[in-house]
Image: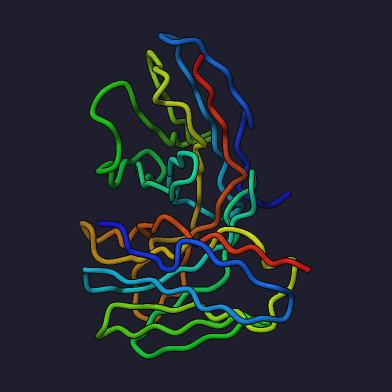
Amino acid sequence: QQPVQSPQAVILREGEDAVINCSSSKALYSVHWYRQKHGEAPVFLMILLKGGEQKGHEKISASFNEKKQQSSLYLTASQLSYSGTYFCGTASSSGGSYIPTFGRGTSLIVHP
Amino acid sequence: NAGVMQNPRHLVRRRGQEARLRCSPMKGHSHVYWYRQLPEEGLKFMVYLQKENIIDESGMPKERFSAEFPKEGPSILRIQQVVRGDSAAYFCASSPADLTGVGSGNTIYFGEGSWLTVV
């Protein structure tokens, strides 16, 4: 079952912040975040493995609450280059293969 | 280019024809995953392969679709007797090992996709 992302779309001006949420009905082993620009490959941003883990990547960071089966992606002081669709991929045991299952994505548009 | 290589990037097929999509994983990667993406939708898992083995094909349609990853050469996703509903972007991804393991930070890296249009 695919994770649920919210919101579906976000429109920002440069410099504003955004939060994208990802929740699952299944117990999670890991959460993988990607950004995809139109017509291009999804690009890996970060992976979170442990409950309560937080990671940062420049001005993009994420948290993973294992108990709540949720992850959030935080984009601070957004830049034009942040525009794209963000996908979370959640992995739980599926025959032992832990393959990421992706949500429908959150479209982020950053205006000048 | 050491990334995941997919070809063709764009493929047009008439209904009833066959489509073959190829994927060469990143150097050093032996695990391949295929996903399908419909317009405005997420990535739907299709199949997970290692060399000469299909590990998980739970996302593959039961008919017309098959995948292989031979000992030599790229992984191939084959769609027989294509229909309009098969039109989509097909993404291949690879990883250096399976995604388990204590503390494993393994993730999957995507290729640029193959866009199939069925006319």
Front-most of residues A7 and A68: A7
Residues A90 and A79: in front is A79
As rendered, which of A93 and A63 lies closer to the eye?
A: A63
The x and y percentages for residue A8 are 46, 61
Residue at x 64% of width, y 63% of height:
A109
Q: Residue at x 53, y 14 (%)?
A: B13
Above or below, A62 against A43 in this view is below
**Position in image of residue B70 (x %, y %):** 44, 34
At x 32%, y 63%, the residue is A3
In the image, taking residue A57 as reference, residue B43 lies left or right, namely left
The N terminus of chain A, quarter of image: bottom left
Residue A94 drawn at (x, y percent): 23, 58
Image-quadrant location for residue B101: bottom left
**Which corner quadrant holds the C terminus of chain A?**
bottom right
**Numbered marks: total:** 0
Seen at 61% across and 82% down, the residue is A17
| Colour scheme | rainbow
User: Which x, y percent locates residue B47?
Assistant: 35, 42
Q: Quadrant of residue A66?
A: bottom left
Q: Is residue B18 above or below residue A73?
A: above
Q: Is residue A11 above or below residue B78?
A: below
Closer to the camera, A104 or B12?
A104
